[in-house]
Image (tube, grey):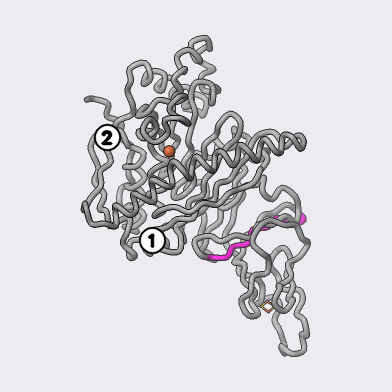
Amino acid sequence: MDRNERLGAAAATMKDFVARTETFRTSAVKRVPTRSYTDPDQWKAEIELVFRRLPLMLAFSAELPRPGDFKAMDAVGLPVLINRDKAGTVRAFLNVCPHRGAPVASEGHGNCPRFTCKYHGWTFRQDGRLIGVAEASSFGAVDKAELGLRELPAAERAGMIFVSLTPGAPMDIDRFTRGYLDDFSALGLAEWTWLGSREIEGANWKVAIDGYLEGYHFASLHPETIKPRTPSNCANYESFGPHQRIGFPQRRIGEALGSIPRALWGEQENNGFDFARILFPNVSMFIAPEIAQIAQIFPGPTPDRNRTVLNYLRREPIRDEADREATEAAINFFRDVTYNEDYLIGLAVQKGLESGAHDEILFGRNEPGNQYFHDWLDWYLQDDSEMPEPVLVRSDEA
Ligand code: FES
Ligand SMILES: [Fe+2]
């Protein structure tokens, strides 16, 4: 099935779910040990075997559109610098000066033809090569070719910049994304405008991810914001390797699609249904009609905390000052809802998980996305590529 057929089939399934008050169910309940969210050894293993090994979606093409644009950021405790050179090539480096370890660019976004370390002024080309050493005679024979910035594997695809946090690690984006990038290419993400970001703090990173993977909580947790548009416990799940596309039908899906030929249903995103796109391990993208919120959820400084960067993009560039103000207001609204409704319950959940009250938590048959995510996380933590990969099973019988 091509993308459009697949989206059309998802739309038809969602329409049927709403008509029958049904949802995608998997075959069994899954239990996850509570310590998976609290244990420091598990947390370290997740960082080593998942965050340091898999390609992470660390930036958008739209964040660095011009030659010389760069972004310096923290990624799971590592200082990372991503830049676009004169020819348009994107590279990533550890943002660490080879002299004595200072960052060569301050956190945030900027544009420059070369990087100058703030500490003693060594300078580096856009490709990371050392070009200038202040008081060079004090360093004897400096091998400039050897003393460059440490490069990280990076690839720009479908409007996104993937980086591996391990220098020299092999990175096969096509194998990792399993055809899902066609969806992002079709969205034209590369041409969208990056509007800004907000940072929030929450519980263990998986507590946060769990919240993005189901719509079972919409009615109770989001009675004012989501429930009026979207019914609870009514969602369709598709998988692309470890990644997922979750379809959330709107209450009006029957009416919205009723007047449209079936062949065009695949093109009706935001007209009757919406999607959350999940890139394993830590990205959740939700496209609303006015704006897209793309969350990057990173393990925080301790197992009980995550640091989430909420990115905001949309198709059209900012038109004028009034549009800019309205957009800032929309961004703050999305941030506030995410923090006040989802992240605050997450912090309370974390306290509950730490309390020792229960040895396990449960994911119902109606929470297949959470089950599939935890299956894949376990698969990566086993660190044995011979193990059969998890499969997303639909089993709707009551
Ligand atoms: S640490 Fe960068 S020049 Fe000294
Ligand atoms: Fe939520």
**Magenta segment boundaries in residue numbering:** 78-86
Q: Earlier in the sequence, mark 1 or mark 2?
A: 1
Residue 153 image position (x, y, % from top left):
57, 60
Please state which of the two labelled residues, at mark 1 or mark 2, is closer to the viewer.
1
Residue 354 lies, in percent from the top left, at 29, 57
Q: Quadrant of ligand 1?
A: bottom right
Residue carrying label 2: 365
Pick out the residue farthest to the top. 259
**Residue located at (25% from left, 53% from top):** 33
- Give the distance between the C-alpha atoms of the residues marked 1 and 2, in whole angstroms: 27 Å
Q: Residue at x 74, y 72 (%)?
A: 123
- The residue that disc 1 covers is 303
Quarter holding residue 212: top left
Amino acid type of the residue tagged 1 in the rendering: Pro
- Can you tell which quarter of the image residue 303 is in? bottom left
User: Can residue 174 be seen at all in this image of the molecule?
Assistant: yes
Ligand 2 near label 2 (Cβ, under 8 Å)?
Answer: no
Disc assigned to residue 198: none
